[in-house]
Amino acid sequence: MDLSVWAGEQPDKAAVIDAAGAVIAYAELEAASNRIAHLFRELGLSRGDHIAILSENRLDLFPVLWAAQRTGLYYTPVNWHLTAGEAAYVVENCGARLVVASATLADLAAELPEVEHRFSLGGAVPGHEPLEPRVELLPATPVEDQSEGCYMLYSSGTTGRPKGILPMMPDAPFGTGMPFDHLMQSAFGFSPETIYLSPGPLYHAAPLGWSLGAIRAGGTTVIMDRFDPEIVLRLIERDKVTHAQFVPTMFVRMLKLPDDVRSTYALDSLRLVIHAAAPCPVEVKRAMIEWLGPILVEFYAGSEGNCFFSIDSPTWLDHPGSVGRSVLGVVHVCDESGRELPTGEVGQLWFSDASPFEYHGDPEKTAAAFDARGWSTLGDLGRVDEDGFLYLADRRTDLIISGGVNIYPREIEEALILHPSVADVAVLGVPDEEFGHRVHAVVSPADGIVPGPELEAELTAYVRQQVAGFKIPRSWAFEDVPRLPSGKILRRVLLERFRSEAV
C-alpha cells in the first residue's frame, strides 16, 4: 500500500487518467509527490500542520495530495463552487499554513485570506508562486520522516456555513493506509486490476477517498472534469472501467439518455457500481439494476466517520429502499426527547460505538452533534426494520410540518423525478397562513418542455397517483434546481428565496 512500492513494481502503469486520455504514471506520481514533500519540509511544515488546495479535477493535483498524505499533513480540498466568502472561511477555519490554487480558479484564489505560503498549479495566479518550477530541482526520493497524513473535509454548506470535520491524525508510517483503504480492498474488491471511474469533484469525501484508495491498491483512477452521462459510458468502454461511483442524480441523467445511445457502448467490464451521497429513488435504482445487472452497491455514511451502512443489489431487491445494515456504528432511532422508538418508527438517527469527531473550531456544533450518552448524529431521519435494515427519510432540517403533519420531501421528489417532462425537482416547505407550511415543488423542465399551467396540472395529476393527497404540492415553480456536483440540493438557496416570497 506504499506508493513507492507500486512505483517500483509498475513504474509505467497509469495511476490516473483524465477524460481526455492524459496519464500520470506511478513512477511520475511518486517522483512528483516526493519533490513537493521536500518543499513542505523546506518550508517548515511538519506532522499535524494544515494545507488547503483549491483545484478542479486535474492530473497535477494528485502529486500535491500524495505529498501531503506522505508527510503527515492535514489537507483540505476547498469546494470551488462555494462563494468567495465561504471558501475564505474554509481556508481560515482550517488553519492552513499553505495554499495551492489552480490557475483556472485565479479569481476565487484572489479572495482567499493571506497565508504563509501560496503556490499555483498550471499557470500564474497573482500573489502565488508557480509550484512546478519551484520543485523541479528538489529530490525525487522520499523525505526521511514520512508518516501518514489525513484529509480534513468540510460539509457542502447546503444548509449553512460549511463545517470542518477534524479526524484524528494517524500515528502510522506512510504505507500503512487509512482504515477505509483496507475496507475498499476487503469489502469492495479493489486490487491492482481495478480501474476506478470517479465522475465527481475531488473536494468531496467519496471521490477523493476512493480515488486515492484505488491507487493504494495498485489500480488506476479515471477522473472527469465534469459529469456528462454519455462521456461516462464512453470512458467505461475506453478504459475498461471495473469500478465506478455515482450519485442518484447521475443515474437519472444516464437513464434518460436515448436507448440507441445507451446501447452504443460496451459496459461489460463493470464489476461494481457504487453509489452514495444522497438517497436513491427506488424506481431509479431498480432501473439501473435492470440495465447494468445486480452489481450496484449502496452505502450510507458521513465524513464524520460515525457510521457506515452498505447493501448489495440482491439484498436490496429483497429490501427495496434500504441503505443496508451497519458495518460501523450502532444505530438508534430516537424521538425529539432522545427516547428510543419502536422498530419501524421514523425518528432521528443517532450512532454509538464509533470513533469520536469534532467540527474544527466550532465547539457549539460539535456539542450539538452528541448527546449525554456520547451518541452522535448527522441530523438525518430514518427507520430500522425488524431485520436491522436502515431506511432513510430526510434530514430533520428538510422536514415539512403542514397542519401538524410530518411530510418528507424525498417521497414527493422520488414520485416526480422519472416523469418524462421533469429534468430535476426539489420539494420544500414555504410559509402558509392556514397550515404553517405548504408543500412547494421546484421543477426543472426537461428539454423542449414548456412550463406553465398545463404542465403543473399534468404533474399534479401524476403525483396524485403516487402519494397521499396532503403531500401533493400546493404551489409550483419552474426553474433550475441548484445542486452541488455531489448531487445534493442547495435547499438553503431555495428556502431563502421562496420563504421570503411567500405570503
Image: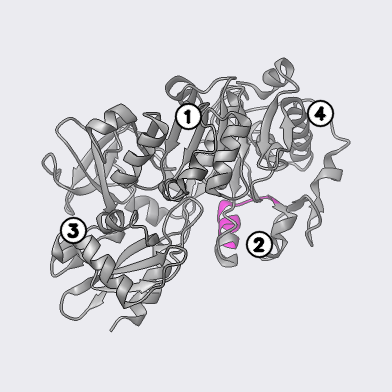
Considering only order in the chain, which callout, 4 or 2, is on the residue closer to the N terminus?
A: 2
**Which is nearer the N-term, disc 1 or disc 4?**
4
Q: How many marks?
A: 4
Circle 1 residues within 10 Å: few <14, some 14–19, many ≥20: some
Is there any visible trace of residue 298 in the rendered image?
no
* Above or below, comparing residue 109 to residue 393 in the picture: below
Q: Is residue 89 magenta?
A: yes
- C-alpha separation, residue under disc 1 versus residue under disc 3: 43 Å
Q: Residue furthest right?
A: 137
Q: Looking at the picture, how far across and down is residue 311, in whole percent?
A: 32, 31
Q: Is residue 249 visible?
A: yes
> Which residue is label 1 attached to?
180
Using the rendered view, name the quadrant where residue 495 is placed.
bottom left
**Residue 411: percent from left, percent from top:** 25, 54
Position of 274 relative to 175 (above/below): below
Nearer to us of marks 2 and 1 is: 1
The magenta region covers 88-100
